[in-house]
Image (spheres, rainbow, N blue to C red):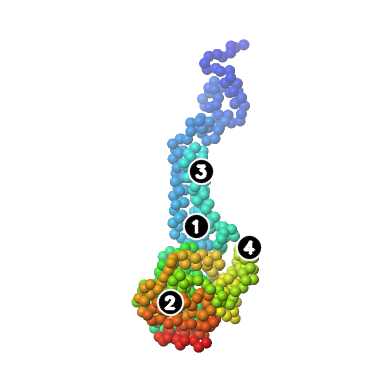
């Protein structure tokens, strides 16, 4: 019997452990004694990348550099997405936006895994922040398209339905931020008139094209125009857009027509650039001061309490998402148009056809309207209004819930202005009394004051 090995190189307990380790599949030679595991023998056991010895030694400088590379790349891409300069409203533009956002989430996830394995706490927290930021960007576009957001949107780009037969000339005017303003150009003449509501007023005013050139356009966020983003619907932008329409058609001086919320923009444009405006028509304009702004609903005749209750039930049942067209038409008819009418016989079918435009979906319209009012602040357009000395015609219905006192204030603010009161009409006098509005505007554009209506 050979003698048992002795000496410092032999440990009976270690030998027993080596024998047990040898029986494990994939044993790592670094875990075996030198006597039983001579150099060159194949590895049998591995504890992750680098084995147990690497794990015990900790991450190498190269591991740390690679981890920080992943983290900083994710942070840079995430920060860059805040300056995304392209459209992302629908179609391929939306896909083109979601792809880099998804890449940000992937990079952040890889960075988080790498930082965890290398035990780099600060890098791990930053990586998780990148993942959270990417997920937030992604859901911000996706949730509103699957019915889980306060606003709704579509995946595909839907072309607006426009009656091109009645308005033969038109197109889009591009703006620096990729917004496209829809316009229609009708008629001819030595002078031109820009009308700020292509989605509404052509039905009444386009017949004036036998004598006048009329350029209708939709402000951004309204009608058939295509906004680049959900922001930018403010007074300053409206002024720049209005001037862009004028310059696009190579017009030095124009007459302006503005209805409701477009009234202040038209008036402010005339105040700032009086040499560019020949005359101005304000139809049911927003009051010239914030103090005068209110709605007196008892002036209108279209209150429909039951209709409002039905609208609330539709919203509670999710019809605003599952049946957006039906909900939109009910919303405009019940909550917006009827209460502002002075004559229910003038109530149109299909709410002017507004719901064919994505911009006129209730949530989007309300957001744009709120942005515009907020941008006006504590407004007072009577200050400096006298700087415009051209003729101003203010048309307002006596039954408009927006009190006629505001229209009177507009007329008083200008040195050459008159109020044309239409008895019994509400906020849509061009719809309720179309011939009366048409005649007044035609006479005014021809350089004369219209006669006061005989009611």
Residue labelled with disc 3: 112
Residue labelled with disc 1: 97
Q: Secondary structure at mark 3?
A: helix
- In front here: 443 or 216? 443
Image point (52%, 72%), residue name:
295
Mark 3, other Cα within 10 Å: few <14 / some 14–19 / many ≥20 = many
Relative to 241, residue 4 above or below: above
1 or 2: tag closer to the N-terminus: 1
Relative to 238, residue 20 above or below: above
Which quadrant holds residue 3?
Answer: top right
- In front here: 70 or 332? 332
Q: Residue 142 — which label?
A: none
Mark 4 or 1: the one toward you: 4
Relative to 210, residue 115 above or below: above
Q: CA distance from mark 2 to mark 4?
A: 41 Å
Q: Specify whether residue 164 is in view.
A: no
Image point (64%, 68%), residue name:
310
Q: CA distance from mark 3 to mark 4?
A: 41 Å
Mark 3 or 1: the one toward you: 3
Mark 1, other Cα within 10 Å: few <14 / some 14–19 / many ≥20 = many
Q: CA distance from mark 1 to mark 2?
A: 46 Å
Residue labelled with disc 2: 410
Q: Secondary structure at mark 2?
A: helix
């Amino acid at each position: 019997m050979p003698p048992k090995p002795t000496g410092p190189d032999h440990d009976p307990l270690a030998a027993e452990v080596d024998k047990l380790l040898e029986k494990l599949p994939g044993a790592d030679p670094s875990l075996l004694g030198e006597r039983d595991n001579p150099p060159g023998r194949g590895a049998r056991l591995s504890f992750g990348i680098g084995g147990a010895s690497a794990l015990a030694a900790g991450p190498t400088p190269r591991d740390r550099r690679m981890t920080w590379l992943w983290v900083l790349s994710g942070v840079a891409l995430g920060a860059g997405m805040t300056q995304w300069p392209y459209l992302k409203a629908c179609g391929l533009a939306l896909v083109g936006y979601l792809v880099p956002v998804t890449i940000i989430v992937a990079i952040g996830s890889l960075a988080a895994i790498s930082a965890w394995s290398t035990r780099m706490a600060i890098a791990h927290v930053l990586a998780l922040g990148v993942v959270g930021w990417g997920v937030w960007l992604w859901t911000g576009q996706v949730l509103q398209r699957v019915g889980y957001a306060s606003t709704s949107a579509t995946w595909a780009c839907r072309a607006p339905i426009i009656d091109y037969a009645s308005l033969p000339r038109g197109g889009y005017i591009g703006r620096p931020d990729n917004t496209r303003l829809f316009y229609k150009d009708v008629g001819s003449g030595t002078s031109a008139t820009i009308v700020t509501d292509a989605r509404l007023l052509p039905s009444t005013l386009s017949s004036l094209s036998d004598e006048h050139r009329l350029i209708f356009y939709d402000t951004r966020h309204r009608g058939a125009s295509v906004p680049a983003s959900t922001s930018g619907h403010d007074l300053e932008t409206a002024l720049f857009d209005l001037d862009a329409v004028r310059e696009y058609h190579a017009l030095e001086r124009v007459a302006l027509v503005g209805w409701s919320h477009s009234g202040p923009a038209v008036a402010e444009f005339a105040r700032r650039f009086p040499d560019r405006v020949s005359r101005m028509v304000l139809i049911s304009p927003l009051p010239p001061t914030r103090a005068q702004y209110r709605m007196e609903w008892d002036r209108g005749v279209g209150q429909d309490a039951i209709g409002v209750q039905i609208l609330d039930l539709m919203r509670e049942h999710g019809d605003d998402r599952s049946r957006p067209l039906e909900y939109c038409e009910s919303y405009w008819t019940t909550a917006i148009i009827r209460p502002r009418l002075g004559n229910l016989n003038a109530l149109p079918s299909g709410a002017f056809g507004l719901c064919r435009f994505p911009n006129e979906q209730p949530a989007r319209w309300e957001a744009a309207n709120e942005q515009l009012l907020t941008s006006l602040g504590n407004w007072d357009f009577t200050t400096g209004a006298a700087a415009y000395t051209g003729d101003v015609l203010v048309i307002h219905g006596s039954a408009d819930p927006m009190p006629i006192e505001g229209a009177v204030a507009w007329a008083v603010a200008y040195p050459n202005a008159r109020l044309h009161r239409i008895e019994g009409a509400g906020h849509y006098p061009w719809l309720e009394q179309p011939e009366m509005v048409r005649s007044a505007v035609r006479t005014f554009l021809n350089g004369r004051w219209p006669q006061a209506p005989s009611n």
